Image: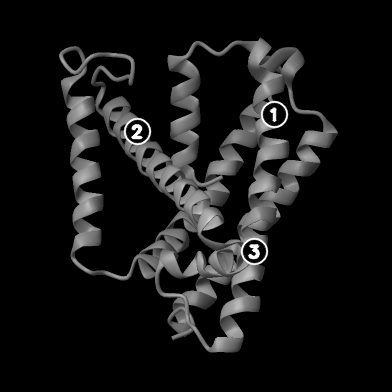
Amino acid sequence: MTPYEVFFFSSGAVEEGWTTKDLSESRANVLVGFPLGGWLSLAIAGCAAVVLLPELIGVTALSQVMLPVAMAGGKLLLAFIILGVVAATSGAALETTLSAGYTIAQFLGWPWGKFRPPAQAARFHLVMMICLVLGVGTLLTGVDPIQVTELSVVFSAVALPLTYLLILIVANDSQYMGEHVNGRALNGISRLLGDHSCCRARCNSLMIITGAGQ
């Protein structure tokens, strides 16, 4: 969970009219989806290391990550993973673009919402288009996307503990949350996530000092 996701999911919940009936689905998405995503990321890294390290291939592009898949499954599996990569990158681009629109529009008090037509929320949609163009333009400059990702993680980790702190304070406020206040189990999981955030912050500091291993 990075700071932009807080704006994305909270704004989406408001737009889609989530109620207490959606809490179980939301918790399942977090408790099942996040660990699953983590394990899949480890699996990708492990497979890439097994195949690429013996050949002394340094990963500098997303396409290289697909080499182990191509070697193991041939063209059919390669086509399948390409579709997955397109879906994942397109979804991430739209998610971050929406988050930027939500953040700026809400801060400035503009009308916002993905369900509102551009005529009713023109500045919100304009901000999203500008952010998307800036993102594509940054890639077209030839900058190393992996380096950009590493730097983004560094800066997001700085704000991450503060983001979690505010969420935990509200989640443990019985006057505000009522019967849905956090229990010991959820607080324990949140504590693990918070410790993980601190570890990420320390690792990112090491990345800065070492120049990301360069």
Would residue 157 be found to the left or right of residue 62 on screen? right
Q: Identify whether 115 is placed above or below 10.
A: above
Q: How is the image coloured?
A: one colour
The residue carrying pointer 2 sits among few (fewer than 14), some (14 to 19) or many (20 or more) residues within 10 Å by Cα, namely many
Kindly identify the amino acid type of the residue bearing the numbered disc 2: Leu
The image position of residue 185, as x and y in percent, is 84, 35
Name the one closer to the observer, 38 or 121: 38
SS class of the residue under badge 2? helix
Three-letter residue code for mark 3: Cys
Q: Relative to residue 179, is residue 99 depicted above or below? A: below
Q: Which residue is mark 3?
A: 199
- Calculate the distance from the C-alpha at mark 1 to the C-alpha at mark 2: 22 Å
In the rendered image, residue 189, in percent from the top left (x then y), is placed at: 76, 43
Residue annotated with mark 2? 98
Asked which quadrant contains residue 214, the reply is bottom left
Tell which residue pokes out farthest to the front in this image. 75
Of residues 112 and 191, the one nearer the viewer is 112
Circle 3 packing at 10 Å, graded few (<14), some (14-19), many (20+), is few
